[in-house]
Image (tube, rainbow, N blue to C red):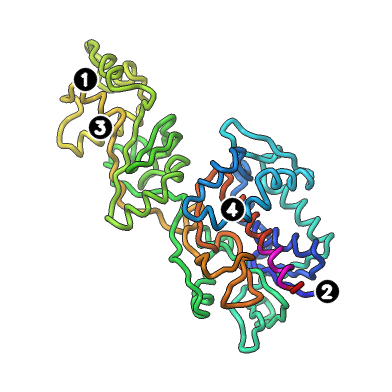
Amino acid sequence: MTAVAVIGAGPAGLMAAEVLALGGARVTVCDAMPSAGRKFLMAGRGGLNLTHSEPLPQFMARYRETAPRLQAAIEAFSPEALRAWSEALGEPTFVGTSGRVFPKAFKASPLLRAWLRRLDASGVRFAFRHRWTGWDDEGRLLFRTPNGEAAVVANATVLALGGASWPRLGSDGGWVERLAAKGIAISKLRPANSGFTVAWSDVFRSSFEGQPLKGVALTVGAHTVRGEAMITRCGIEGGAIYALSAELREAVLRLGQATLMIALRPDLDAATLTTRLSGMRGKQSLANFLRKAAQLSPVGIGLMQEAAIASGRPLATFSPAELAQLVNAIPVQLTGVAPIDRAISTAGGIAFNELDEHFMLRKQPGVFAAGEMLDWEAPTGGYLLQASFATGAAAGRGVLAWLNR
């Protein structure tokens, strides 16, 4: 049997190992951590979102400019195929109200345990606490292990080392320099699906840290997303923010800041809001009046107060029409991007033109790459895991085709 090394025991690496083992290869999965799938398990803490149920054309659009590069891999291992794969492991799936797909157990651990059992039964070996450090002059893979340095001969290699988010779980981006030294073009790793910093006032921060914004519409430039966000001590994060994180990040990196527009009542037009806000306030406080007349939450009213302070005018001096306009166009200045080690995922990585159609590195024949270490990004909602699984499967098929040649 032909020996293949898979470096990285996350979804992409494990899927590559499964495809390789089914194809008759002798596979060893090496990972720097003491166990497999640590970030996968973290992703499943709040409910493992495996993929999404929307039609494939809309699904692929989530990958933006890299969609053509991922199309063949995702078509070959589609969301439907991923659901069937999960069910074959004893973990049937269901579609949530948002269209997201989850295992019925709603956790990552049962699925991972079943998967590791099947990989073990198929002959896949694991070498944990093996940190890959590159190649020696003879082309052997070098690892730092508890027993010292080790050199491993492999007929082919799959690199599935992840990005640089949550480094304590194993993805630390340490591979970048090793591949760059081989002349491989790598886009700078940047935080994706991340939060952003905002210079909140002390009063707002102490009052609303940890408070959700529900049913809002967030806009940056020509991009608008409906959903939820969360006020943090240093800024703002959450699903709707993550969906805009690429646009927000690039604006912050380019200009030093970005303006996020928040609509608190996106289903109400300005005329309707103006009518509601033209009623008699009487002895009510402004906050109570806004809460009752426009059904605004305290945190939403707090955001309006922040915007009024920034404009240099007390909110109480705003006319009904001005209040109505502000309700659905609150400007929030984002001053920075949250650190990459706190981001959900990573943008940047190995440039796709460094890979052939089988995910093999053109400058390193016999070395394939998959998962988040490639230069793509996607919002949360199942798209991250889907592409990781699909590119892992594609790299595994690529190895088998290369070995057969």
Tell me which residue sits at (24%, 36%) in the image: 307
Q: Position of residue 91 (x, y in %)?
A: 75, 42
Q: Amino acid at mark 2?
A: Met
Q: Earlier in the sequence, mark 3 or mark 1?
A: 3
Q: Position of residue 221 (x, y in %)?
A: 32, 43
Q: Earlier in the sequence, mark 2 or mark 3?
A: 2
Q: Which residue is mark 4?
A: 71
In the image, residue 302 sits, relative to residue 250, either above or below, namely above
Indicate the quadrant containing the N terminus: top left, top right, bottom left or bottom right. bottom right
- Span highlighted in magenta in the image: 395-402
Q: Main secondary structure of the magenta part?
A: helix
The answer to whether mark 1 and mark 4 are in CB contact below 8 A is no
Which of the 4 image quarters holds residue 233?
top left
CA–CA distance in space, label 2 to label 4: 31 Å
Tell me which residue sits at (20%, 39%) in the image: 310
Q: Nearer the viewer, mark 4 or mark 3?
A: 4
Q: Which residue is mark 2?
A: 1
Q: Which residue is mark 1?
A: 320
Tell me which residue sits at (79%, 69%) in the image: 25
Q: Position of residue 112 (x, y in %)?
A: 72, 52
Is the residue marked by circle 4 packed among few (<14), some (14-19), or many (20+) residues within 10 Å? some
> Does residue 210 appear left or right of residue 323 in this picture?
right
CA–CA distance in space, label 1 to label 4: 50 Å
Residue 164 seen in the current view: yes
Identify the mark at residue 305; answer none if there is no mark. Answer: 3
Q: Nearer the viewer, mark 1 or mark 4?
A: 4
Q: Earlier in the sequence, mark 1 or mark 2?
A: 2
Q: Amino acid at mark 3?
A: Gln
CA–CA distance in space, label 3 to label 1: 15 Å
Q: Earlier in the sequence, mark 2 or mark 4?
A: 2
Q: Which residue lies most toward the bottom here? A: 137
Identify the mark at residue 146; answer none if there is no mark. Answer: none
